[in-house]
Image (tube, coloured by chain):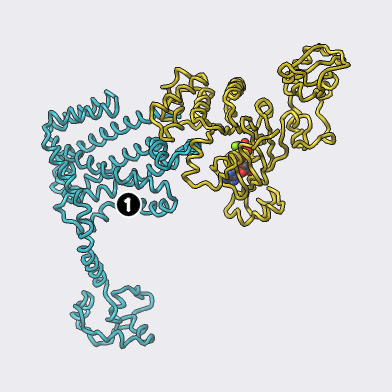
């Protein structure tokens, strides 16, 4: 069912240090990060990354601090050049771009939202929002029009003439998002865009992003170190550790079938009932028969909702529908089983 | 017989030493030795504890082929005089506009009557600072200086500072930008800037006096600029290097060209530091303009100099106070302008 990916990263390696080329063979031979640092004095940033990002999806890259998330996302718009590997966008090799072509690519194809907002402090909110347009050489009128439009869209109309330092962190990041959206680029990179915000504002911003996404269908690459955020936003989840991909796939599947103790640790603290969806634990059945259904539920409902619906009765079963069509059956017993983290032995390979 | 005779004998250099005998005038020491009538007589051997340092003059006594120190100084002078003319051919046309600017500006400041110039300066002050207090201070200072007949001297000093600061900024900011962009450039420049700032100002007045004549205004212009340009270069470099990495990264991520980045991000964000550099440049120009009155720079410095030369205590003190007044008002004005910029740059 997969079409051509919008972005695909193939065999990407990044080594930091004075002479990365010279130690690349050792890394290709399987040397790990601590050994490389100790024996050759080079930092292994990324190793053998293979990720495909689909058009219109939110790909979330998650990992702890220092796992290489920022390094990875910066390879997409070549703020960092790899030591080895390929980055293809729309099938074109970004690494082959000339300086001019690369600049145009950054102006038109990719925009970026930063953890620390990185707005221009000496420009007004409106000028910041229209920045991408102005950089591209469009006139002030066009820049202001687009800037104003997207500021309104992110809920900041009325603040056009304020300066960034006059706004709260959440509002500044809205400007950051408006700035990225105003560039009208199909791909949006977000490096821990919400990490600097307090939890309530953060939830607001996540909702805003999801709401915008239902309408805009951008290809979004979102970085976070927060699993709740990752699960909320991700269509495709990539988990990084020490510069390599531990597991990637559909987030619900990763949650149900973690293939590494590292990920189990990650997912053990999560409120599974709130995160897991009916579709992930149901039995796919063409149409319900032979069952006594207690009711009909949506495939995208959370388990939490179902538990309260059933009043905790594990004998019940529900018919699952997606946009009005039967897609499966949910037995409450399966639901209860899914609430307990699976042992690693049972895990199936995902992707 | 000189102390080091033996040395040259053992090295077998005696012939070489005596080859060019009887050239050049005798040194004072030789004359003294001659007049004491001891030529030819065996001198008592010098005790070891009084071994003279093998300096040029001492060695010359033992070996006439070695030059004396005074020959060396003459050599330096001759070398300097020899490169002076070719150097002037290049330097004169380049620096000539400086003379024109300095003279033109002086003529302009003199030509504008006081009742226009003072209000104009006050308006400029208010425009830059937006502070009534500072403006009032400037007004009082100027009226006072005019009242005690120091107006034209003060205006001359201001005119020189004005021109020299303009040129320092025009040259210093681009130099600072170059330094910020290249680490090699920075490594080369820093020792030069250090030297310009640590050299006692009199030391580089000397070659300048020989290179240009004292009647040319560019002489003191160059002296002032060399000294005062340093802070604006340094702080431009620092300011650009200190620009928030994240903002630069954002500029790159949105595909800004180097030019857009420089003029749209780096210079505006470095502006508070650049302005601080300009403030220091102005203050250093003022310090130097006083010293430069030694080489015919007009202004309040001339009065200070007169006070020192003729021991006219009153003249010296009053003009010194005038300089203090100028220093304070220039500093207040530029600091207030700087504060205004900083206020609009909070992040
Ligand atoms: N320029 C560099 N030189 C040397 N090492 C680097 C450089 N940039 C990153 N690294 C190293 O690469 C690794 C990954 O860094 P990166 O910034 O990508 O981590 P991250 O996952 O984004 O972490 P965080 O959550 O703290 O932002 C770290 O070990 C870091 O020390
Ligand atoms: Mg990071």
Mark 1 beta carbon near ligand 1 (under 8 Å): no
Which residue is found at the position 38% from the left and 86% from the top? B10
Q: Is residue B255 left or right of residue A244?
A: left
Mark 1, residue position: B196
Which residue is found at the position 50% from the left and 32% from the top? A118
The chain shown in cyan is which? Answer: B
User: Residue B181 at x, y = what percent?
Assistant: 42, 47
User: Residue A311 at x, y = what percent?
Assistant: 81, 11
Q: Is residue B210 above or below residue A241?
A: below
Rendering quadrant holding ligand 2: top right
Quarter of the view holding residue A292? top right
Chain to which mark 1 belongs: B
Q: Is residue B336 above or below residue B56?
A: above
Whether residue A198 appears in this view of the structure is no
Q: Is residue A97 left or right of residue B165?
A: right
SS under mark 1: helix
Which residue is found at the position 83% from the left and 11% from the top? A294
User: Residue A134 at x, y = what percent?
Assistant: 42, 32
**Who is closer to the viewer here, A212 or B182?**
A212
User: Residue B152 at x, y = what percent?
Assistant: 13, 37
The chain shown in yellow is which? Answer: A
Which residue is found at the position 26% from the left and 44% from the top? B167
Q: Is residue A242 left or right of residue B173?
A: right
**Who is closer to the viewer here, B137 or B120?**
B120
């Amino acid at each position: 069912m997969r079409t051509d990916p919008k972005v695909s990263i193939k065999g990407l390696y990044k080594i930091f240090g004075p002479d990365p080329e010279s130690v690349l063979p050792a890394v290709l031979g399987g040397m790990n990060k601590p050994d490389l640092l100790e024996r050759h004095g080079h930092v292994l940033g990324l190793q053998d990354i293979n990720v495909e990002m689909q058009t219109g999806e939110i790909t979330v890259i998650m990992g702890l601090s220092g796992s290489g998330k920022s390094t990875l996302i910066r390879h997409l718009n070549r703020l960092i050049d790899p030591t080895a590997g390929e980055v293809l966008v729309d099938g074109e090799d970004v690494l082959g771009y000339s300086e001019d072509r690369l600049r145009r690519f950054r102006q038109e194809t990719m925009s970026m939202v930063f953890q620390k907002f990185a707005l221009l402090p000496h420009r007004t909110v409106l000028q910041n929002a229209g920045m991408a347009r102005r950089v591209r050489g469009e006139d002030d009128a066009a820049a202001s029009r687009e800037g104003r439009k997207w500021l309104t869209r992110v809920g900041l109309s009325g603040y056009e003439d304020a300066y960034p330092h006059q706004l709260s962190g959440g509002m500044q990041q809205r400007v950051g998002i408006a700035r990225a959206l105003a560039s009208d680029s199909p791909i949006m990179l977000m490096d821990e865009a919400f990490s600097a915000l307090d939890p309530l504002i953060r939830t607001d911003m996540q909702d805003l992003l999801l709401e915008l996404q239902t309408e805009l269908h951008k290809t979004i690459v979102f970085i976070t170190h927060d699993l709740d955020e990752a699960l909320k936003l991700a269509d495709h989840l990539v988990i990084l550790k020490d510069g390599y991909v531990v597991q990637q796939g559909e987030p619900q599947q990763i949650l149900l079938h973690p293939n590494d103790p590292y990920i189990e640790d990650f997912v053990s603290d999560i409120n599974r009932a709130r995160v897991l969806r009916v579709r992930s634990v149901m039995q796919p059945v063409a149409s319900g028969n032979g069952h006594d259904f207690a009711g009909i539920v949506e495939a995208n409902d959370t388990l939490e909702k179902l538990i309260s619906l059933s009043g905790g009765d594990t004998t019940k079963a529900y018919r699952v529908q997606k946009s009005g069509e039967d897609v499966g059956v949910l037995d409450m017993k399966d639901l209860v089983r899914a609430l307990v983290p699976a042992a690693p032995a049972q895990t199936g390979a995902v992707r | 017989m000189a102390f080091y005779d033996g040395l040259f004998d053992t090295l077998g250099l005696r012939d070489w030493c005596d080859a060019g005998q009887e050239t050049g005038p005798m040194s004072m020491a030789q004359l003294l030795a001659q007049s004491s009538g001891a030529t030819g007589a065996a001198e008592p051997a010098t005790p070891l504890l009084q071994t003279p340092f093998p300096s040029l003059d001492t060695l010359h006594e033992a070996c006439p082929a070695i030059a004396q120190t005074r020959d060396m100084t003459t050599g330096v002078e001759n070398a300097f005089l020899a490169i002076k003319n070719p150097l002037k051919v290049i330097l004169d046309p380049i620096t000539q506009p400086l003379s024109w600017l300095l003279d033109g500006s002086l003529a302009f400041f003199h030509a504008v009557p006081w009742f226009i110039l003072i209000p104009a300066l006050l308006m400029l002050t208010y425009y830059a600072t937006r502070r009534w207090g500072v403006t009032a201070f400037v007004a009082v200072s100027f009226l006072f200086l005019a009242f005690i007949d120091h107006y034209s001297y003060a205006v001359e000093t201001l005119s020189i500072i004005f021109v020299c600061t303009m040129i320092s900024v025009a040259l210093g900011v681009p130099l600072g930008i170059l330094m910020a962009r290249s680490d090699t450039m920075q490594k080369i420049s820093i020792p030069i800037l250090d030297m310009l700032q640590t050299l006692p100002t009199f030391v580089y007045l000397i070659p300048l006096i020989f290179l240009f004549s004292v009647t040319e205004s560019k002489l003191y212009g160059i002296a002032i600029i060399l000294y005062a340009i340093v802070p604006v270069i340094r702080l431009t470099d620092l300011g650009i290097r200190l620009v928030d990495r994240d903002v630069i990264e954002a500029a790159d991520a949105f595909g800004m060209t180097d030019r857009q980045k420089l003029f749209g991000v780096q210079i505006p964000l470095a502006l508070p530091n650049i302005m601080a550099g300009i403030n220091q440049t102005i203050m250093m120009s003022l310090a130097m303009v006083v010293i430069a009155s030694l080489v015919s720079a007009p202004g309040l410095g001339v009065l200070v100099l007169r006070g020192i030369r003729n021991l006219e205590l009153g003249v010296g003190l009053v003009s010194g106070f005038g300089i203090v007044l100028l220093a304070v008002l220039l500093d207040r004005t530029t600091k207030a302008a700087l504060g205004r910029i900083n206020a609009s740059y909070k992040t």
